[in-house]
Each structure stands twice: as structure tokens, then as C-alpha cells.
């Protein structure tokens, strides 16, 4: 879900050329969910091989990663670990939404309404252990580093920017900034379009970047205050926040109370709106577990393994996969990756 505070942030446009040579810590789960939701057949069902196994995530992952590599971007995919206990409420809400979508999809099938089938089917996707495992296997075959976070992927990715192991976090959510990321890059879809939330239409987008220092300077607050502001608006750890308080009102309240968070949440009557202590949410953002056990070094892509996974196992077009492999091979030396495929 992420925190809805982008309306008070000031992004800067960034060109693909400016991203050349940059290492990005990618929120893997977010992109996999995107692929599962958007790469589907006309009736909304996911792409599958002849055995009925979903392949939408592999199609999206292979294509998007290859396009980034061609543009000189160095991705490091970061995968979620065990979610904080506070996130259970969000997870339960998402389960309910998916069940409701499944029922509406079944009704659309009965009516033969293709548009509704497509609309609701995209909301039923689930990121299974098998899908995550297949994604890691493909990325490793492509020579792209993967990192297993002990908890939230965005927190781990943010930590990697703090350590200088990644230049920015690649995600659509603002949470990375709350976790302390130096930079956040959004809208990295090569097509320049993204699906509008809850609709079948698309909108044009361009890459944009949020520099944490600029974000905080523009708002006139520090990171702790930004976390407090976000808690009022609603986070993954208490989605509702406080009814009637949006990001602009929350910013005003935070500035009025400075660093006196006790007074801030007392005035906002936090305890009337939530049973979750605001301190617990803030501590989760500030002290979430991360690991130093990872590598950022890419390896040579294994063309044989890629073909085995995509063509032999999941029946992708041999010609298209070979074409993409060739393109990656021509550009890897420019990115500082290994120069040859095995």
C-alpha cells in the first residue's frame, strides 16, 4: 500500500541517461505484483504454460530487467522477509480484498463480461513461494544480484543506499524514504505508461527521483517528523491513520508541535482512533531488521540456464529469448558487468 504522502513531495524528473551506470536496489515484491496484475490474457487470467503454471511474473521480470540492463542500469533485487507483526492488519485487509475480487470475477465469468473479468482478475494475484523462488532463479541466471531481507525489502534497500551499496531505491511507494533511503526512483516502466489504480485505462509516466535531503528540506522537517506525519495519514502498520487528516493537515500539525510527538499525538487524539501505540509504529520504521550479508556484484549471465528456465521449462519463444540474451550481452560490458555469457 505505502504511505499516501506524494502530494506534498516534490519529485524531480530524471532521464534514462542520468540513470546509466547507477545501481538500484529494487523492491522485488512490488514489481512482481505489478507483473502478475498487468501481464494477463484478454479475459484477465494470467499467462500460463501448457501445464497451467503462471508465467506472467517471468515474462515481466525477464523483459523489464533486460531493458534496464540495456540502458546501463545495475539492478539489485531485494526480496521481503518476515513482515513485522504490525503489518498483519494490512495483510488481512489484502486477503479480504482478494477474496472479494475472486467472487466478483466469478460473477463476471457467469455474465461473460470480459471487461469486468479483466478488472477483477488482476486483483486476485498472490505472490507464492514458488513464484518468488522462480524469480530468484531467473535473476541469478541473468547474473543479477538478489538480496534476501530479514524483514521489509524497502527497509533493506534503504539501508543499502545509506551504506553506499546502491545509489537509489527503485519502488513506487514512499516508505523507502521513511526507512532512511538516500534516494527513491519511481516510474521505471520502459513503456512510459502505467495502469491507473482501480481502472482499466493507463496514464503516461516518466521516471522521477526523490532526494531525501531535498524532500525534508522542502517540507521543513526531519525524518522522525516525516514518520510521525505518515503515521497520522496511515501506514502499512496502521492503515487508517486518523480519519480526516490528510498529508497537508498532518504536515501542519507536525510543524506546530515540532519534536514534541507526545503532544502531537495527544492533540490528534490518536488513542481514540487506534489501539496500536504510535511509538511502536515509529520504532518499527526506525529499527526494522536489516542484514549486511549480501553481495552487490553482478555475475556473468548464464545463457544456457536462461534458455532452460524460460524455453525448455516454460515454453517461451526461443527466438525472442535468444534475441534478448544477445542484446544484454552487447551491453553488459558498458555497465561494468562481466563481458561474456557462459
Image (cartoon, rainbow, N blue to C red):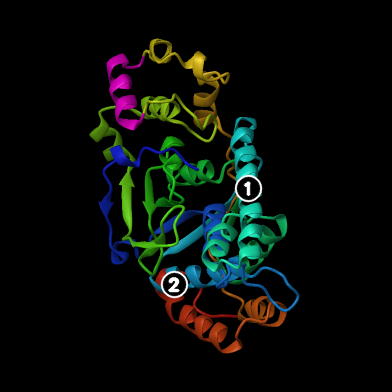
Q: Closer to the camera, 293 or 214?
A: 214
- Residue at 45% across / 70% down in the picture? 69
Q: Secondary structure at mark 1?
A: helix
Determine which quarter of the picture holds residue 246: top left
Q: Closer to the camera, 216 or 49?
A: 49
State the image coordinates of residue 314 (x, y, percent, origin top left): 69, 77
Is the residue 115 above or below the residue 286 in the image? below
Mark with earlier residue (2, 1): 2
Q: Is the residue marked by circle 2 packed among few (<14), some (14-19), or many (20+) residues within 10 Å?
A: some
Magenta segment includes 315: no
Which residue is disc 1 drawn over? 100
In the rendered structure, the answer to whether residue 134 lies left or right of residue 319 reads right
Q: Secondary structure at mark 2?
A: helix
Determine which quarter of the picture holds residue 288: top right
Q: Give residue 237's mark.
A: none
**On the rendered image, what quadrant is the C terminus found in?**
bottom right
Q: Closer to the camera, 130 or 110?
A: 110
- Residue at 55% across / 73% down in the picture? 42
Q: Is the residue marked by circle 1 packed among few (<14), some (14-19), or many (20+) residues within 10 Å?
A: some
State the image coordinates of residue 135 (x, y, percent, origin top left): 63, 63
State the image coordinates of residue 337 (x, y, percent, origin top left): 48, 70
Report how far apart the C-alphas of labels 2 and 1 lie in the structure. Answer: 35 Å
Q: Name the magenta segment's main secondary structure.
A: helix
The part of the chain drawn in magenta is 246-259
Which residue is disc 2 drawn over? 67
- Residue at 34% across / 42% down in the picture? 6
Amino acid at each position: 500500500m505505502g504511505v499516501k504522502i506524494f502530494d506534498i513531495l516534490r519529485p524531480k524528473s530524471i532521464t534514462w541517461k542520468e540513470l546509466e551506470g547507477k545501481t538500484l536496489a529494487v523492491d522485488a515484491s512490488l514489481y512482481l505484483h505489478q507483473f502478475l496484475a498487468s501481464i494477463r490474457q484478454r479475459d484477465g487470467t494470467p499467462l500460463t504454460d501448457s501445464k497451467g503454471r503462471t508465467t506472467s511474473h517471468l515474462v515481466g521480470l525477464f523483459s523489464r530487467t533486460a531493458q534496464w540492463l540495456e540502458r546501463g542500469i545495475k539492478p539489485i533485487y531485494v526480496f521481503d522477509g518476515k513482515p513485522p507483526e504490525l503489518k498483519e492488519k494490512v495483510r488481512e485487509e489484502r486477503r479480504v480484498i482478494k477474496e472479494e475480487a475472486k467472487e466478483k470475477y466469478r460473477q463476471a465469468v457467469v455474465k461473460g463480461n470480459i471487461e469486468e473479468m479483466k478488472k477483477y482478475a488482476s486483483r486476485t494475484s498472490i505472490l507464492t513461494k514458488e513464484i518468488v523462488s522462480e524469480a530468484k532463479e531467473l535473476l541469478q541466471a541473468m547474473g543479477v544480484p538478489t538480496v534476501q531481507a530479514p524483514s521489509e525489502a524497502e527497509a533493506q534497500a534503504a539501508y543499502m543506499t545509506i551504506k553506499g551499496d546502491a545509489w537509489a531505491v527503485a519502488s513506487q511507494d514512499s516508505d523507502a524514504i521513511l526507512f532512511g533511503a538516500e534516494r527513491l526512483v519511481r516510474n521505471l516502466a520502459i513503456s512510459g505508461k502505467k495502469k491507473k489504480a482501480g481502472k482499466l485505462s493507463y496514464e503516461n509516466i516518466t521516471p522521477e527521483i526523490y532526494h531525501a535531503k531535498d524532500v525534508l528540506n522542502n517540507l521543513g522537517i526531519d525524518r522522525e517528523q516525516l514518520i510521525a506525519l505518515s503515521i497520522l495519514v496511515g501506514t502499512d502498520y496502521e492503515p487508517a491513520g486518523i480519519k480526516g487528516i490528510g498529508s497537508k493537515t498532518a504536515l501542519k500539525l507536525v510543524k506546530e508541535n515540532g519534536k514534541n510527538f507526545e503532544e502531537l499525538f495527544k492533540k490528534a487524539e490518536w488513542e481514540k482512533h487506534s489501539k496500536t501505540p504510535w511509538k511502536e509504529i515509529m520504532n518499527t520504521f526506525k529499527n526494522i531488521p536489516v542484514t549486511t550479508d549480501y553481495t552487490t556484484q553482478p555475475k556473468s549471465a548464464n545463457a544456457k540456464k536462461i534458455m532452460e528456465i524460460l524455453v525448455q521449462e516454460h515454453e517461451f519463444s526461443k527466438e525472442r529469448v535468444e534475441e534478448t540474451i544477445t542484446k544484454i550481452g552487447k551491453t553488459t560490458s558498458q555497465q561494468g558487468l562481466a563481458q561474456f555469457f557462459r
